[in-house]
Amino acid sequence: MRKKAFLLINTSLGKEDTSYVSKARSISSLLSKVDEVKSCWVVAGAYQIIAEIESDGLSQIGQTVSDNVKAIPDVERCTVCLVLDEVREERNDDLDCLSWSQARQ
């Protein structure tokens, strides 16, 4: 079974840097070339980039982070959040808020 993780990435680019978004996009572009990276987002908040990675095992996820992600210039810190369980719930978008909350009880 393939393992999945989300990477919360801080860059060396300060929020006061006016080119923050374009530099984060450049880093994201480099990340997207890594085979294990499935999706990558430039975000606002405590982190500048969030990436989703998938691999055959936990050791490969660690190897990917060490060899590929942390090797990218301006990646200052990378927090790895391993997915332990994925829950998918079907939902009917036609339900209003009240009936949706009742349906979940």
Image (cartoon, rainbow, N blue to C red):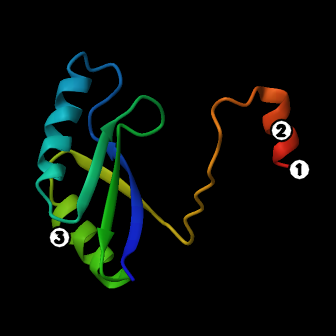
- Mark 1 vs mark 3, foreground winner is 1
Residue contact between numbered discs 2 and 1, judged by CB atoms under 8 Å = yes
Asked which quadrant contains residue 53, the reply is: bottom left
Q: CA distance from mark 1 to mark 3?
A: 46 Å
Label whose residue precedes the other's in the sequence (1 or 3): 3
Question: Residue at horizontal 36%, vertical 56%?
Answer: 78
Residue 70 appears in the picture as rendered: no
For label 3, count other residues whose C-alpha is less than 10 Å away and answer few (under 14), some (14-19) or many (20+). few
* Residue 25 placement, left or right of 100: left
Residue at mark 2: 101
Element type at mark 1: loop
Residue at mark 1: 105
Question: Residue at horizontal 30%, vertical 81%?
Answer: 56
| Amino acid beneath label 2 | Ser
Asked which quadrant contains residue 103, the reply is: top right
Residue 72 appears in the picture as rendered: yes
Location of residue 27 in the rendering, given as x and y in whole percent from the top left corner: 17, 42
| Amino acid beneath label 1 | Gln
Q: CA distance from mark 2 to mark 1?
A: 7 Å
For label 2, count other residues whose C-alpha is less than 10 Å away and answer few (under 14), some (14-19) or many (20+). few
For label 1, count other residues whose C-alpha is less than 10 Å away and answer few (under 14), some (14-19) or many (20+). few
Asked which quadrant contains residue 61, the reply is: bottom left
Question: Residue at horizontal 18%, vertical 25%?
Answer: 22
* Residue 102 placement, left or right of 83: right
Question: Residue at horizontal 78%, vertical 28%?
Answer: 97
Q: CA distance from mark 3 to mark 2?
A: 45 Å
